[in-house]
C-alpha cells in the first residue's frame, strides 16, 4: 500500500500505531492535510461526503495494512509485550461490558423490556468478541 510498517511502531498509550521515523511523520502530515482539504473543500455537500468516505476508506485500509505487517518489523520481545497488552485490554473490555450489562439489569429490574434487561448491543459486541476469538483460535491451531 502507501505507508510502510518500518515507519511506525506500536503506541505506548492507547491503540494503534505511531510514527517512529521521519517518513512516518511525513505520512501522518499528508494524511492530516488530505483529511483537512477534503473537509474544507468548497464543493457540494453530497459530493464532499462521498469524497470524504473514499479518502477515509483508503486511509483506514492503509493503516490496517501497516498494522498487519507491523509485527514482522519488530523483534520477538516487542511482539510478545504487545500481545500481553492486547490480551489485558481484551479482558478489561469484556469485564467492562459485563459490568455495564449487570448495572443496566439492576436499573431495569422492575421493567419488562425485550429479551434482555439490558441494551441488546452489548450482546452483539460480546458475540462479536467470542466469534473473533473462536476464528482466531482455529486459525492459529491450523497454522501451528
Image (cartoon, grey):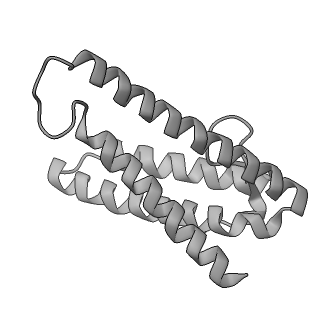
Q: Position of residue 57 (x, y in %)?
A: 40, 62
> Is residue 114 positioned above or below 72 on the image?
above
Comparing 43 with 140, the one in front is: 140
> Is residue 136 positioned above or below 60 on the image?
below
Residue 131 is left or right of residue 7, and the answer is left
Rendered residue at 34%/63% (across/down): 54
Residue 14 is left or right of residue 60, and the answer is right
| Residue that lies at the very extreme toward the front in this rendered image | 110
> Is residue 6 positioned above or below 124 on the image?
below
Rendered residue at 63%/37% (across/down): 14
Rendered residue at 30%/59% (across/down): 51
Comparing 4 with 44, the one in front is: 4
Q: Which quarter of the figure is the N terminus placed in?
A: bottom right
Res 1 visible: no
Residue 5 is left or right of residue 92, and the answer is right
Comparing 113 with 49, the one in front is: 113
Res 90 visible: yes
Q: Position of residue 109 (x, y in %)?
A: 21, 19
Residue 92 falls in which quadrant of the image? top right
Q: Which quarter of the figure is the C terminus placed in?
A: bottom right
Rendered residue at 78%/52% (across/down): 22
Q: Position of residue 137 (x, y in %)?
A: 59, 69
Comparing 110 with 48, the one in front is: 110
Q: Position of residue 62 (x, y in %)?
A: 54, 65
> Is residue 56 positioned above or below 5 on the image?
above
Count of labels in the image? 0
Amino acid at each position: 500500500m502507501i505507508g510502510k510498517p518500518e515507519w511506525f511502531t506500536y503506541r505506548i498509550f492507547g491503540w494503534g500505531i505511531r510514527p517512529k521515523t521521519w517518513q512516518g511523520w511525513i505520512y501522518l502530515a499528508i494524511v492530516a492535510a488530505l483529511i483537512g482539504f477534503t473537509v474544507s473543500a468548497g464543493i457540494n455537500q453530497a459530493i464532499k461526503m462521498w469524497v470524504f468516505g473514499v479518502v477515509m476508506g483508503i486511509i483506514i485500509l492503509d493503516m490496517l495494512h501497516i498494522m498487519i505487517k507491523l509485527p514482522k518489523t519488530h523483534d520477538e520481545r516487542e511482539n510478545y509485550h504487545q500481545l500481553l497488552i492486547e490480551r489485558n485490554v481484551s479482558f478489561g473490555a469484556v469485564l467492562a461490558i459485563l459490568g455495564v450489562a449487570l448495572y443496566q439489569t439492576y436499573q431495569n429490574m422492575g421493567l419488562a423490556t425485550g429479551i434482555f434487561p439490558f441494551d441488546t448491543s452489548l450482546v452483539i459486541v460480546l458475540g462479536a468478541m467470542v466469534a473473533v476469538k473462536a476464528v482466531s483460535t482455529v486459525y492459529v491451531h491450523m497454522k501451528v
